[in-house]
Amino acid sequence: MSGRAPHGPGRSSSSKKRIGIIAARFHEPISKKLVDGAIVALRHHGVPEEQITISWVPGSFELPFAAMALARSRRFDALVCLGVVIRGETPHFEHVARVAADGISHVGLATGVPVTFGVITAENESQAWERAGGIAGNRGEDAALAALEMAHFSAPKIRRQRGRR
């Protein structure tokens, strides 16, 4: 699939949202561009810098574990998972991409905290750069905007859960 994700309507209450960004250090220069795109998008939609927390993990395989820990903390309205997996000469690419996608999805479903998938899966480094602020846009920005929209969507449920503890 190519192109950019459609963005929902802007929301006025974004300044109260607490967003966690979890980024994989593997292919760090590209991951940093994804993080930059996510921060710019969140700030543009009214999320103050002090409401954004960035956590780094070794690679995309570790994203679900960190996301689960942060989701269980109940400190965040949504989480953005960012990373880069580039196909190599072995099946390792498929395993890492599958674990990252399945794990990230599981975290959101298991905790009720929206968790978005901003992991680039590319055939080569050139394709990854294109999706980290190049001609194909910035998947970090897309994932951050999706997280913000889902945080608004699920806000009443999260508030009720926080009140029970």
Image (cartoon, rainbow, N blue to C red):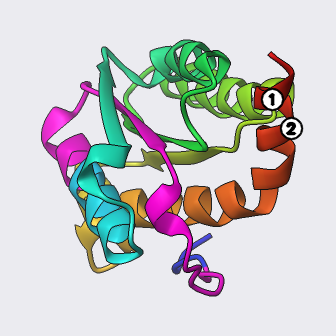
Whether residue 154 is situated above or below residue 61 in the rendered picture:
below
**Residue 119 part of the magenta segment:** no
Q: Is residue 165 visible?
A: yes
Displayed quadrant of residue 67: top right
Image quadrant where one finds the C terminus: top right
Rendered image quadrant of residue 23: top left
Q: Residue at x 86, y 38 (%)?
A: 160
Residue 131 can be seen, yes or no: no
Q: Which residues are magenta?
A: 6-33
Where residue 5 sits: x, y (%)? 59, 76
Q: Where does label 1 land, which residue?
A: 163
Q: Where's residue 58, x and y in %?
A: 31, 14
Determine whether, in the image, residue 79 is placed left or right of residue 162.
Answer: left
**Label of residue 160 in the image:** 2
Q: Establish if 161 lies above or below 115.
A: above
> How dense is the environment of label 1, judged by Cα within 10 Å: few (below 14), some, or many (20 and up)?
few
Mark 1, secondary structure of its residue = helix
Residue occupying image coordinates x 39% and y 57%: 140
Q: Nearer the viewer, residue 112 or 93?
A: 112
Q: Residues within 10 Å of mark 2 (few under 14, many from 20)?
A: few
Q: Label 1 amino acid?
A: Gly
Which residue is found at the position 25% from the left and 42% from the top? Answer: 31
Q: Is residue 13 magenta?
A: yes
Query: Going 37% across and 30% down the picture, which residue do you hit?
Result: 88
Do the residues bearing badges 2 and 1 touch, measured as CB atoms within 8 Å?
A: yes
> Where is residue 25 shown, x and y percent of the image?
24, 25
Query: x, y percentage for residue 159?
Result: 77, 41
Q: Which mark is residue 72?
A: none
Q: Which image quarter holds the N terminus?
A: bottom right
Say if 108 sits above or below 62 in the image: below
Element at label 2: helix
